[in-house]
Image: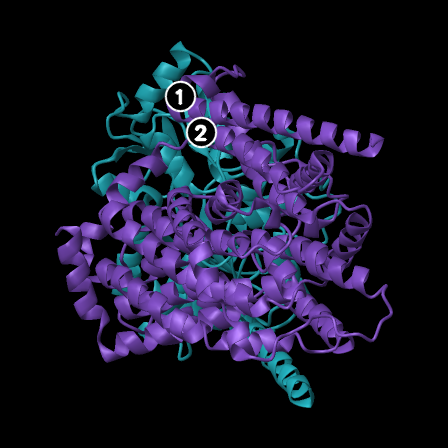
Chain colours: A purple, B cyan
Amino acid sequence: MNAVEGLLHGLQSAITPTNLLWLLVGCLLGTLVGILPGLGPPATIAILLPLATGFAPATGLIMMAGIYYGAKYGGSTTSILLNIPGESSSVVTCIDGYEMAKQGRAGKALGIAAIGSFVAGTLGVIGLTFLAPAAADVAVNFGPPEYSALMVFALLLVIMLAGDSMLKGFIAMFIGLFLSTIGTDLFSGAQRFTGDQIELAGGIEFIALSVGIFAVGEVLINIEDKTEKQLFQVPNKIRDLLPSRQDIKKSTPAMLQGGIVGFLIGILPGAGSTVASFVSYIIAKKTSKTPEEFGKGSIEGVAAPEAANNSETGGAMVPLLTMGIPGSGTGAVLLGALVLYGLNPGPLLFHEHADVVWPIIASMYLGNIALLVMNLPMVPLFAKLLNTPYKVLYPAILLISVVGVYSVNFSIFDVGMLVVFGLLGYVMRKLDIPPAPLVLAFVLGPIAENAIRQSLLLSNNSPIIYLERPISATLIGLAVALLLVLAFGRGRKVRDQVVEIDA
Amino acid sequence: MFRIRQLLTVAIAVLGLIALAGCGSSGGGGKSGPVEVVTHNAVGGGSDVFTRQMIKVMYENKIIDTNWPVRNVPAGDSIGAMSYMFDHKGNAGLIAQVTPTWLATPMTVENAKVSLAGLTPITLVATEPQVVATNAKSQFNTFADFVAAAKKAPDTLVQAGGSSTANDALTRLVLQDSLGAKWKFLSFEDTGSRITALLRDDANIMLGSASDVAEQVKAGQLKVIAVIGNQRLDAFPDVSTTEEQGIDSSKVPVQFRAVMGAPDMPADAVQKYQDDLSKMVETDDWKNLIKDDGLVTQNLQDDKLETYLKEQTDIVGGLLQGLGLRKDQ
């Protein structure tokens, strides 16, 4: 069965009243859990598994997939409104999204996030429909040396997110890398920096770290100002709450680019959506006509990472459906669901169970449309929430943070970590150290460390292995070029600053 | 203004409720139903899926009348799950699906307050013999071929596997010792990466359960060259065992799947679970399940179970000692 035929067959069986109903339920649930940090898609799908295994496989999986990508639509909401990144791929959205909210442009940010998610989400599914077999080959050929090179490249890009001071970006990155080493070492089984706390044996919980540094840190720094004034200016007219035609036009290249980058990087199991979100952010910044707006509330700076984050879903489904290899936590749960349905996910899934796979893919087109229709009307409503005075808003942010972090593992220890990282976030803001490089380095650290150690084990500690394989050699070359540009560009900037001071 | 404030209150209440609903449905501390089953895996992990499959078989065959909820406690790689069991001493409605990780992890932690010995043994449902898989194009057709090649060129061949304390890693230690061969061990976090390492030829073999590789074998990408132990598997009836290939594997730690209860579980509750599980292993659904998953039914109870656990405790304990990871003594 070729892709077009499969898709048409799939569409036919996806458009039954039952399937449509559960698709909408999935998308709605996904949006809701996406908004709240903590209880993410894997936990939600888990709760629904006993119910869903009673459905026909296609119906259940259509709903579960809906939760997966629906959560990504919802994920941007707290990032933009409250500076709470609910997942690692939303960290980059906070940078410009929250700035826009502070300027009273939350509605525009939320609106462009929804539109960008739709455009790129659809691009991702198109990629999944037509490129799956070729894409699967890429995923197989990405071994430890390739991941090592990709991580070196990615960590360099992370520093570029730092804004003005490269040094402060480095500091943030190193703290993040250090924090990521806490826990049980995969290779030796040794406990590293855990202080014999069993709660740390599995490493620091990501949600506690990101919500602490972003949201709690932000609240702490703001309660220093004892003003009664309203925090945010929210326009009253509905039209001002949504992106204008010009906003959409300006963001279109970022959305398309984010969609393509997101799909391509999303294919790689492991770091997909996170890496995709900041790679597309930086591409958007470098190709923008107004790069100076980035970091200060650029609408493209929201469109690009949100687009990448959503098309990643299509990419991540490639290894799952073509090889039975999950690329993320949610992918693992979906894999479990496939097994529970007795579908034996693996290389033959497309052939043996085309009647299940194609309806899922077809439903993703429909789901993206449904999500856009569901999310856009919510935008003015959410944006108006920011009219709330700070004495209500701040306790609310803290409450959501605590509930969110607790609900991940039902662990009070994690809430303690939230406080610790809240204080760290506060200190970093005082010292003007950017939080994004820290949080992203924390996510990339273990992937980088494992890949580098795996590669060196394969090559008997010879670093030549990174240059022997074409993909990794190319990536290393790119990284070196980037480093040169970075050093040269920054040098000029520093010189300019010195000249200014002299004058 | 007032309306917005109301709206916000409502919004927070709703979000709070969603969170509470989450706590409730993923298991409410024995209150949400008569029985709750704990697993140390996150949803979708091997143990989690097996637990749900087991419950499904019992429910669909009317051995149990409710679909028992599963509680996932992934914290601390079984320590969290075991602590949860210890917090509910004497609870007749709390059981766990236990694997060798529950034996090994507490041994590697200083002053661990929990150990498998504190739980109430119920039934060792099945064992999951490891199979040895390679790329379908590999030159190795038996595990003996691989060992011979490893002897000729020590430390050049590569086994892809999990963490250094996982079953496949410990198995390698035992085999290297008894065979006098040496090969490298490449740790990956997940099974998928181990399979792609074989497909890329970065690694030569991997050890895993039959279900880990069955689909790739069917698709002609991988082949299975041995079953570790002395019993052939229904999933791969033509593949010979390591014993048949002349390799002693009696000291290899076995991947088992047991059901154990909260500490001090009342005897009548234990008996009820044992009866339910004994009925389960007789059903056709179970027989299909173990064929697909590459499991071997054991249904060990009481004395036999305790002897078996003691034997495995000694094997795993000795191996961890050798690695210098034993911290509980």
The kind of secondary structure element at disc 1 is: loop
Q: Furthest-front residue in view?
A: A503
Would you place residue B97 above or below residue B67 in this image? above
Give me the residue at 45% from left, 65% from top.
Answer: A114
In the displayed structure, would residue B2 be above or below residue A223? below
* Circle count: 2
Q: Is residue A165 left or right of residue B237?
A: right
Query: Residue drawn 42% across and 31% down?
Result: A143
Q: Position of residue B167 (x, y in %)?
A: 49, 39
Location of the C terminus of chain B (image quadrant): top right
In front here: A154 or A496?
A496
Query: Badge 1 sits on which subunit?
Result: A
Residue at the spot of label 1? A469
* Viewer-side residue, A215 vs A284: A284
The answer to which image quadrant residue A470 occupies is: top left
Crowd tier of the residue under label 1, counting other residues whose Cα lies within 10 Å: few below 14, some 14–19, many 20 or above: few
Nearest the camera: A497 or A317?
A: A497
